[in-house]
Amino acid sequence: MQQGKAPARNDIVPVVIGGDIGAYALCREFHEAFGVTTIALNTGFIGAIEHSRIIDARAVASLDHDVIVPAVTQIAGQRPDAHVLLVGNTDQLIELLEDVKADLPANVTCLCPPRDAFDAVCDKATFSRLCREHGLDVPQMDVVSLAGADPIAPTQIPFPVVAKPAVSAEYYRYIVKGFKKVYYMTEQAQLDKLWADLREAGFAGEFLVQELIGGDDTYMDSLTIYVGREGKPLMLGGAQVLLEDHAPAMLGNPVAMITRQNPELWNRAGAMLSDAGYRGFANFDIKRDPKTGRQLFLDCNPRIGRNSFYNLAGGVNPMEVATLDLVDGRGEEPRVVADTILYTLVPISLLRRYVRDESLLAEVDSLVRAGKVYDPQRYDADWSLRRRIDVDLTEKNQIRKFAKFYPEPTDTSF
């Protein structure tokens, strides 16, 4: 991947809702593809965005319909001749885009899937059925409804198990209250207490209980697909996870990955999205069972994912693909992430501590020697002393977080 500013394109105005590293990566992708400054809207921003030369960061009071619609309408009104591309990159932000898109001006395009397709793939129970219909393996699973007060039957899945919400977006406010994204349970009594605590907090949605698939973080894979307006996958990219975040509110978010190719699996997943009427970006979490070799699809996120930048580093700029499709109507042949690179948000020293597979460590060292290491924050076109300080502080914070939440690697990642 060559870093560099493209000739400026004046007919697009990217607007990214968000203020984290994932939002910065999207802004960088727009800048590399089209040489444009991206407007970022959020209630607060990390230093990488606040001190960026390629981002116009605009604070808003909240991420509610009544705040975002006027803010985006004003932007669109100032550039009536341009295409405003509105992007979000969390489940709750995609819900927001679904809510506001009908009330935005005609020159605004929201990068989010159709509502019915969104509901189909975001409900993890429905998603499991779609996977089975397309020959994609999924873990054994119970769907537990927390509505009402009826007793909940014990699970028949052997312990240990994993418990997580069926629909992530509706659960977000409970994470803010202190509930975890994912639970590791070793006995029924723990599940019973979780059900009671969730009901007491007012949660009435569905939870999933899944069989625990062994293997540490390196047995996780990521798959990113972009389905164009005509229903054909236009981008396919994948990576093997080396290390995930283990802070309770961020659990399961990869922080280091090596790009990989798996065309057969990618094509089946792409066909599933197309058949469901899906459009736009989708990101799949997949785990390889170390005992059987099965590749199990855990869930599908209705967005490109926090780590979208591994695709650009591997040779395909996702924001370029989406813009050419949505603005220019260019439905070209699928572009595949083919370059092998190391994507990391953490220091290499931390990887060497947590990655226990000697062959993977050797590959990490080889990619480091070859200069194929990429962090979206480290961008030559957006570099300054203050930005360097921001990145250094972020990396030091990662070391502190791992010491607190995941001091030693385990065979299950929990």
Image (cartoon, rainbow, N blue to C red):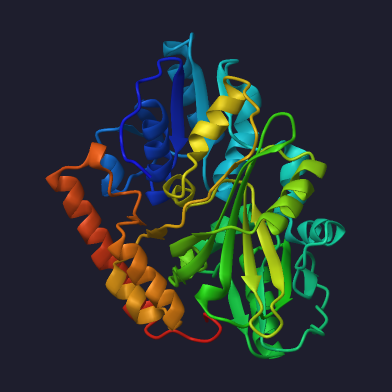
Residue drawn at (57%, 21%) of the image: 327
Residue 309 is left or right of residue 208, and the answer is left
Residue 173 is left or right of residue 365, and the answer is right
Residue drawn at (64%, 34%) of the image: 99
Residue 332 is left or right of residue 403, and the answer is right
Q: Quadrant of the N terminus?
A: top left
Q: Position of residue 42 (x, y in %)?
A: 40, 39
Q: Relative to 210, say whether 32 is above or below.
A: above
Q: Position of residue 410 (x, y in %)?
A: 49, 86
Residue drawn at (32%, 74%) of the image: 350
Q: 384 or 142, which is in the foreground?
A: 384
Q: 172 or 120, which is in the foreground?
A: 120
Q: Relative to 365, say whether 156 is above or below.
A: below
Residue 116 is left or right of residue 365, and the answer is right
Q: Position of residue 225 (x, y in %)?
A: 63, 46
Residue drawn at (71%, 62%) of the image: 166
Q: Relative to 177, say whether 305 is above or below.
A: above
